[in-house]
Amino acid sequence: MARREIFAGNWKMYKTHQEALDLAQGIRAWTTTGIGNREVIIFPPAPYAKAVAELCRGSRIDVGMQNMHFEQEGAFTGEVSPPMVRDCGCRYVLIGHSERRHVFGETDDDVNKKVIAAFKSDIEPVVCVGELLEEREKGLTNEVLRRQVEKAFTGIGAGRMKKVIIAYEPVWAIGTGKVATPETAEEAHGYIRKVVKNLYAADTADSLPILYGGSVKPDNIAGLFCMANIDGVLVGGASLKVDSFLEIIRVK
Ligand code: 13P
């Protein structure tokens, strides 16, 4: 089955307001043609999401928020609610990024609540999963992936599952320069698809876009993107410059 091809950039906590606009403008200018049906999503820092979404309106680029709270509103100082994400013009939200899980202590239960909250506000979730190095070394990779996927989508029906994107980001490959080999990534993606197939129907699993993230660069994208179960990438560092992000998006 032909699946969506998605190239996403997670800007994390980088860029000033003007730099964010310049980067978005640069990507917009170069993605008007030559990218076929590929979809481009950028995740700017929250304070710039609205301005970046306005700049990208009518273009090939969609915008997402890097995180949000699961409550609709309330006394949660410093947090961003799902309706605020929508108000900012974001179509997507990243949920359960490894930095949220491992730096800020986000649990599988939080991830599940956020996925449910995203749908409540008509936001499409990009759910990140991935194992720690020690988990991989102990042979626990599949167990971790299965648990994260099963928990993330508890209570999510097949119809909603069709709007989900999963990003496999092995924690040991994020920001380390240690990209997973295409074979290692492919194995994990195939396993994630199998888990989704066991939870839903085969067609749901077959159409699910699964992105790889972790030290993706212009010089390693080709090997990754040609794998059968790798439908795109979630890029950190290399998405912060127009040139390197475009080189990735335009991979043959
Ligand atoms: P790097 O591409 O910098 O390793 O970051 C990956 C990532 O965390 C994307 O969400």
Image (tube, grey):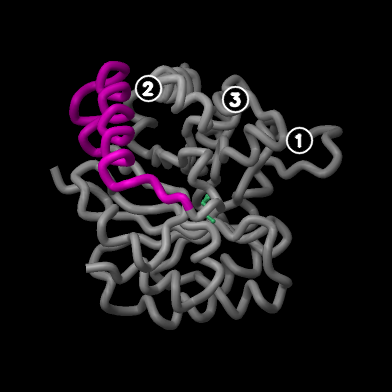
Give me the C-alpha separation between circle 3 and circle 1.
14 Å
Residue ID at (47%, 33%):
130
Q: Amino acid at mark 2?
A: Asn
Q: Amino acid at mark 1?
A: Glu
Magenta stretch: helix, strand or loop mostly? helix
Q: Is residue 178 above or below residue 206?
A: below
Residue ID at (72%, 35%):
104
Residue reaching furthest to the front: 137
Q: Which residue is mark 2?
A: 142
Q: Are marks 3 and 2 in contact (CB under 8 Å)?
A: no
Residue ID at (60%, 20%):
109
Question: Around disc 2, counting alpha carbons within 10 Å, would you say few (fewer than 14), some (14 to 19), or many (20 or more)?
Answer: some
Give me the C-alpha separation between circle 3 and circle 2.
23 Å
Residue 113 numbered tag: 3
Instruction: Give the percent coordinates (x, y) of residue 188.
Output: 33, 33
Q: Is residue 181 above or below residue 8?
A: above
Q: Which dot, 3 or 2, sits closer to the camera?
A: 2
Q: Nearer the viewer, residue 129 or 113?
A: 129
Q: Which residue is mark 1?
A: 73
* Secondary structure beneath label 1: loop
Q: Nearer the viewer, residue 85 or 24?
A: 24
Instruction: Give the percent coordinates (x, y) of residue 225.
Output: 26, 55
Q: Is residue 31 left or right of residue 251?
A: right
Q: Is residue 213 left or right of residue 38?
A: right
Q: Earlier in the sequence, mark 3 or mark 2?
A: 3
